[in-house]
Image (cartoon, rainbow, N blue to C red):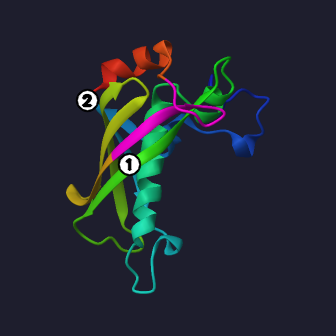
C-alpha cells in the first residue's frame, strides 16, 4: 500500500502502512503526545525488571516522537540553513513501580515551557494508566557545533501552541 508518505519508489519492505502510524509514531491527546513501547529482554536486568537506564531510553523515544508528530525530525533540524539540535541538560526521574518483560507501557510527553534556548518537558511512563516513572526534563537548543542558541522563531512558533 502506498500513501503520500510512502511513494511507489520506496521498496515495499520499507513502506509504512498508515494503519501502523499510531504504533510507530504515537498519538496526540490534548497537549500530550502518547507513545506505546513494549518491554523487551534487552530492557531488563538480571532480576527480570526493567533496568533503570531503559526508562531513560523510553523517555527519549517519547520526546523524539513528540517532535516528529509536529514535523520536527532530528535529521531535518540538522539539515536546516541554521542547523540545530536538542541536548538534555537536566533529567530528574522518579521511579514509582517496576515494569517487566513483555509489559506494554505508554510514554506521555508534554512541553511545559520555552524560554530562550531552554525548554522544560514533563514525561511519565504508565502501565494500564498507572504511573511507573515520571521525569522532568530540561533541554536546550544547540547549534551543530554544540553551543547553546535561542530556539529559532519558526520552531518556537510550531511548539508554542502545544505548551501545556
Against 31, residue 152 (above or below) is above
Q: Residues within 10 Å of mark 1 (few under 14, many from 20)?
A: few
Q: Number of numbered discs present?
A: 2
Q: Which residue is mark 1?
A: 90
Residue 156, horizontal then vertical, whole percent = 42, 18
Query: Residue placed at 68% from the left, 17% from the top?
Result: 81
Mark 1 / mark 2, whichever is N-terminal: 2
Q: Which residue is mark 2?
A: 30
Range shown magenta: 137-149
Instruction: Please identify the quadrant where the N terminus is shown.
Output: top right
In front of the other: 119 or 108: 119
In front of the other: 93 or 19: 93
Asked if residue 69 can be seen in this view, the reply is yes
Query: Would residue 113 appear left or right of 154 to someone viewing this image?
Result: left
Residue 131, horizontal then vertical, whole percent = 22, 58
- Residue 83, image quadrant: top right
- Residue 32, image quadrant: top left
Asked if residue 22 can be seen in this view, the reply is no
- Residue 121, image quadrant: top left
Amino acid at each position: 500500500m502506498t500513501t503520500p508518505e510512502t511513494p511507489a519508489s520506496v521498496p515495499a519492505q520499507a513502506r509504512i502502512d498508515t494503519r501502523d502510524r499510531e504504533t510507530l509514531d504515537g498519538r496526540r491527546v490534548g497537549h500530550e503526545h502518547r507513545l506505546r513501547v513494549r518491554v523487551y529482554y534487552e530492557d531488563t536486568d538480571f532480576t527480570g525488571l526493567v533496568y533503570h537506564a531503559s526508562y531513560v531510553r523510553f523517555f527519549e523515544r517519547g520526546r523524539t516522537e513528540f517532535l516528529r508528530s509536529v514535523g520536527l525530525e532530528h535529521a531535518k533540524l540538522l539539515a536546516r540553513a541554521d542547523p540545530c539540535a536538542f541536548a538534555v541538560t537536566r533529567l530528574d526521574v522518579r521511579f514509582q513501580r517496576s515494569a517487566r518483560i513483555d509489559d506494554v507501557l505508554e510514554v506521555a510527553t508534554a512541553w511545559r515551557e520555552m524560554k530562550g534556548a531552554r525548554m522544560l518537558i514533563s514525561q511519565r511512563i504508565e502501565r494500564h494508566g498507572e504511573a511507573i516513572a515520571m521525569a522532568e526534563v530540561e533541554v536546550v537548543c544547540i547549534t551543530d557545533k554544540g553551543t547553546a542558541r535561542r530556539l529559532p522563531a519558526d520552531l518556537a512558533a510550531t511548539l508554542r501552541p502545544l505548551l501545556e
